[in-house]
Image (cartoon, rainbow, N blue to C red):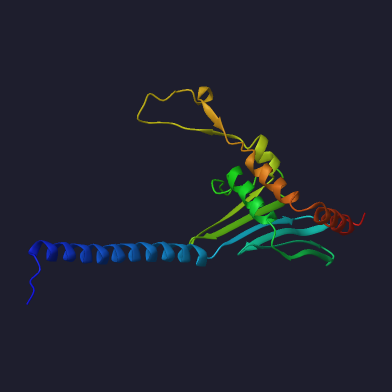
Amino acid sequence: MRRFPMSRIILVFAVIMAIIGWRFYYGRTEFSRVNSVSHTYNAPSAIYCRLLIHYDKPPIYEEEYRMQDVEGVSTFEYRIRTYNGKQITITAPPHQIYDVSFFYGSLDQEGIWQLMSRPPMGDTSVHYTIYVKQLADFKQGERTITFTDPHYLATTAGHQFHIDLSKNSPTDLLKMQSTTLADPRYDQIVNEFRHFGPPTFQAHVAQARTQALGK
């Protein structure tokens, strides 16, 4: 019976183990990569944006701008309702366009996630409610903001005083330092909604407002 040198047996064993190890590692790496890609591909993606404006006085009762992008398909609509019961709705059919995603990106840059609800001030006869929601990578976030008179909030909105009792506080409150509460983002974001959409959509919105106002 022919006997193989021990060194050759060890060499053959090392080669076999190297092949098994490489296939095992490569297989796991490929599986991990494919699984990661599949996870990203299957992750739901959706954006929802809404502005609701309620008027305490006629002729307009409510205006609403509503946009959404679900899995790359965008839809958006405008609705106006009057105190005498007239309602006009303008709806853009679903399309694989980027209008809503670009719009949401603009809101995000404006700081929509940092804005807070504010108590009624300025012209309190018109009430604004902004709602945004995003789903991405199996995570979601949403926010609702209520306020009145965005132009007032952007330009005036009063001042804020801070007293630190741990330090020597001024005895004369009239001489205290203050910071303004004005925040231009409220006005900017409302205008973003007001001017959303392609020219044809904006033209139909303008026509609907004209009809609702009885002009």
**Residue in the picture at 88% in, 55% down:** 210
- Quarter holding residue 181: top right
Spot the residue most to the front.
Answer: 2
Q: Is residue 11 left or right of residue 65?
A: left
Confirm whether residue 138 shows in the render: no
Front residue of this view, candidates 53 and 185: 185
Give the x, y percent position of residue 137. Answer: 49, 60
Front-most of 61 and 212? 212
69 or 140: nearer the viewer: 69
Quadrant of the rendering where the N terminus is positioned: bottom left
Relative vertical location of residue 133 with respect to residue 163 in this rendering, above or below: below
> Above or below — where is 44 with respect to 147?
below
Residue at x 48% of width, y 23% of height: 172
Q: Specify the quadrant of the image occupied by residue 63.
A: bottom right
Q: Is residue 205 above or below residue 86?
A: above
Q: Which residue appears at 67% of the width and 52% of the height?
A: 128
Whether residue 8 can be seen here: yes
Residue at the extreme bottom of the image, as rendered = 1
Q: Is residue 153 left or right of residue 166?
A: right
Q: Position of residue 98 (x, y in %)?
A: 68, 55
Give left or right: position of 42 versus 96: left
Looking at the picture, how far across and down is residue 83, in whole percent?
A: 81, 62
How many numbered markers are drawn? 0
Q: Quadrant of the C terminus?
A: bottom right
Q: Position of residue 209 (x, y in %)?
A: 84, 56
